[in-house]
Image (cartoon, rainbow, N blue to C red):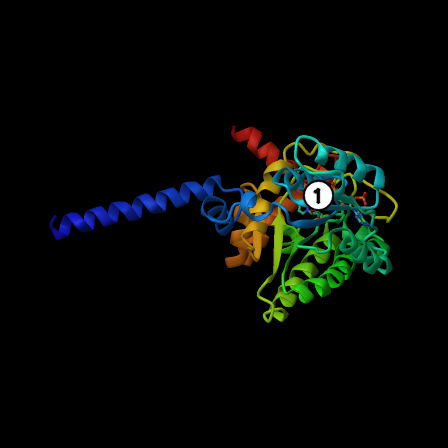
Amino acid sequence: MDVASILVLLGGCVVLYLTVQLIRFIRADADLALLWAELLGHKPEHQLPGKVVWVTGASSGIGEELAYQLANLGALLVLSARRKNELQRVKKKCLENNHLQENDVLVLPLDLCDTGSHEDATKTVLQHFGRIDILVNNSGRSQRSLFVDTDLAVYRALMELNYLGTISLTKHVLHHMIERKQGRIVIVNSVVGLVGACLSSGYCASKHALLGFFNTVRSELTDYPGITITNICPGPVQSQIVDNAFTEQVDKTPAHTDQSHKMTTARCVQLMLVSIANDLYETWIAEQPALIVFYVWQYTPTWAIWLTNKVAKRRIQNFKSGMDADSYFTQKKTKTS
Ligand SMILES: NC(=O)c1ccc[n+]([C@@H]2O[C@H](COP(=O)([O-])OP(=O)(O)OC[C@H]3O[C@@H](n4cnc5c(N)ncnc54)[C@H](OP(=O)(O)O)[C@@H]3O)[C@@H](O)[C@H]2O)c1
């Protein structure tokens, strides 16, 4: 083969590679590192069986689905949230159709805001299982209200739960992991931990705080390479999050809105488990066109903010007319399909 033919062949390979990457990006529902890990990395079914996994917020939504998928993989579970009856329901379902025994799933009611109870809760888990391999900090509440209309108490409540509650529980579990020199801390953050989103100023702030906090703690744990911290940042996902969101006042929740246009909980959790199995530091899980906004935000924040301000106008209109704020994307999809 002469030099010209080799160059043509190499050029063809580069074009093919770039085309494959472009198609992957257009169809992507997560950042590229995570999608590569899903394709070529450690498989959750090899990494997670037999691990003791403590999931907070396991009574609904993402945490509930995490419990089911982890149970199917044979992980041993601690299920926490405030509603014991819902946790019992999730436990019952976890024990169906797999090999877990009654003692392999511990229901441990916990209010994340009651930080005084976190030490005893950690002791209870250690008494039951003898170790904690993975803590999934998933409990959290969102917000649907404009800053100018919202009581300061809502901002306090969001920080107490999403930020302070999470770091308090993590601190107790981390002491145990440091003793063992191993463990995984997972934070179910959000893409709004990276960018801004109208109607969720306090929620965004709490998730930004978590991202900065755990990126810093990771850098303080370099003497413990066996302890990893994974920040998972999902975009809109089907769950009860909007129904349970704070509004202008602490005790008022929003009217129910349709969430079916969002990413399925099952797909989100599948990608979360890949993130955990591969100890990825930070992952983004979102469908297009939202995903591309997060990339643009990293490189050209001013352009991204200009773009999201256009979307914000529509989201606020949706909110004021009683629809889910994110219905923008569904309507776009419906129009184009
Ligand atoms: N769904 C999304 O679009 C999305 C996107 C990005 C990130 N996230 C994050 O995903 C996580 C799970 O949310 P989700 O979407 O699954 O919403 P969800 O269905 O409302 O679940 C929230 C969970 O948090 C628990 N929780 C609320 N307050 C608590 C407290 N004081 N103490 C302990 N647990 C408490 C709830 O249980 P109890 O009421 O029984 O306590 C529930 O199990 C949250 O951190 C959220 O920020 C969600």
Residue under the image location 41 percent in, 40 percent down = 23
Visible in this render: residue 300? no
Residue under the image location 83 percent in, 41 percent down = 253
Q: Quadrant of ligand 1?
A: top right
Q: How many marks?
A: 1
Residue 67, image quadrant: top right
Q: What amino acid type should be assigned to the residue bearing mark 1?
A: Gly
Residue 237, image quadrant: top right
* Residue 94 on image: x %, y %: 71, 36
In the image, farthest residue toward the left: 2
Looking at the image, residue 77 sits to the left or right of residue 294; the answer is right
**Above or below, comparing residue 43 to residue 282 in the picture:** above
Looking at the image, residue 4 sits to the left or right of residue 323; the answer is left
* Residue 174 on image: x %, y %: 70, 63
Query: Toward the viewer: 132 or 211?
Result: 132
Q: Identify the secondary structure beneath mark 1.
A: helix
Residue under the image location 64 percent in, 39 percent down = 69
Query: Toward the viewer: 213 or 149?
Result: 213
Q: Is label 1 within 8 A of ligand 1 (CB to nearest ligand atom)?
A: yes
* Residue 335 on image: x %, y %: 55, 29
Residue 243, image quadrant: top right
Query: Toward the viewer: 282 or 18?
Result: 282
**Above or below, comparing residue 300 to residue 145 in the picture:** below
Looking at the image, residue 231 sits to the left or right of residue 94; the answer is left
* Residue labelled with disc 1: 63
Badge 1, how many Cα within 10 Å: few under 14, some, many 20+? Answer: many
Visible in this render: residue 234? yes
